[in-house]
Image: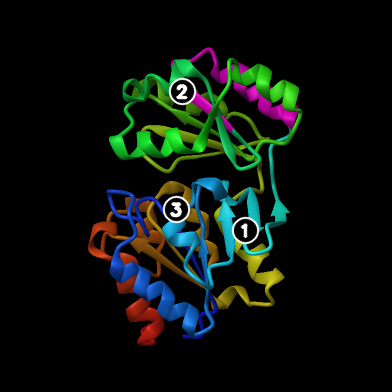
Amino acid sequence: MDIKLIAIDLDGTLLNSRKCLSDLNREALISCIRKGIHIVPCTGRTVDGIPAEIKDIPGIRYAITTNGAVIEDMKENIVIDTRMLTCDLALELLRFVDSYRVMYDPYIERRGITESRFIDHLPEFALTPELQDLVRNTRDICPNIIEFVKKANKPVEKINLFFPDMEERAKLRAELEKRNDILVTSSISNNLEINALDATKGDAIIRLSSHLGISPSQTMGIGDGENDFTMILKAGVGVAMKNGSKELIEAADYVTETNDEDGVASAIRNLVLEMGI
């Protein structure tokens, strides 16, 4: 199997339940890099949300962030490609979701934007302690999100939503999916994520591989959640984590162990380093 690029989701995939990179997974990444294989974090997070323990591995250069909205060369600090929500569209969406019981934060220039009414009450929105830490470290606080976005007048990478009530989540998702100008997906059970129409992880893998002169057939995508579905379908080899969604597992070419069982290392060892299926 001639794999030249491996795109890997972070939460629920490369990182364990404590949001940490295991030694075995790290060693597997380094082994791939030594073979000339590009290791690409492919995440719903912004580039600032990629842990240093991953970004600091020598040879990890490119990243696909905010579900494919941004492709970045982290070594040169250059944005290669973007697929973002316009400021006007983002403002329309933010005003709409504001009428629901939901925590919302748009991502602008690598950072999430939030308010005290959200950041000071994270447990009320069903965030785990690990996720609370991540949110606090990757959001900037402002008095009013909508006014901030309006004044910034910049494209928005993604709008993230956290729900304390699943019925409210289902109701809002149904309304959002009536639109034909956005994509709605999810990475965990109590969130929704709004992106521009062509901002998907799968499409971003194709665009990055083209930029690097790599055939799509030479790519591998590894993930666990709904927002990884396009990655599993469009990469040359799609790998689902055993802790992934049923739909993702059924669509994958290969199912590996869970994120708490070094599933990424197992897949890399079996499919790439030892030249499996």
- Which residue is painted at 36% across and 33% down in the image? 132
Residue occupied by mark 1: 204
Decide: few, some or many residues near mark 2? Use Cα within 10 Å; few <14, some 14-19, many ≥20: many
Name which of mark 3 and mark 1 comes first in the sequence: 3
Whether residue 250 is visible here, answered yes or no, is yes
- Front of the two marks 3 and 1: 3
Decide: few, some or many residues near mark 1? Use Cα within 10 Å; few <14, some 14-19, many ≥20: many
Give the left or right position of residue 190, taking residue 229 as reference: left
Name which of mark 1 and mark 2 comes first in the sequence: 2
Separation (CA) of disc 1 from disc 2: 27 Å
Q: Nearer the viewer, residue 264 or 21?
A: 21
Q: Nearer the viewer, residue 248 or 228?
A: 228
- Which residue is painted at 46% across and 23% down in the image? 103
- Front of the two marks 1 and 2: 2
The question of residue 105 being in magenta is answered with yes
14 versus 165 height, above or below: below
* Local secondary structure at mark 1: helix
What's the residue type where badge 1 is placed? Ala
Give the left or right position of residue 69, taking residue 20 as reference: right
Q: Nearer the viewer, residue 203 or 162?
A: 162
What's the residue type where badge 2 is placed? Met
Separation (CA) of disc 3 from disc 2: 23 Å
Residue occupied by mark 3: 51
- Which residue is painted at 40% across and 19% down in the image? 120
- The boundaries of the magenta stretch are 87-106
Question: Residue 144's x, y, as percent?
Answer: 60, 16
What's the residue type where badge 3 is placed? Pro
Find residue 107 and name its label.
none
4 versus 75 height, above or below: below
Residue occupied by mark 2: 103
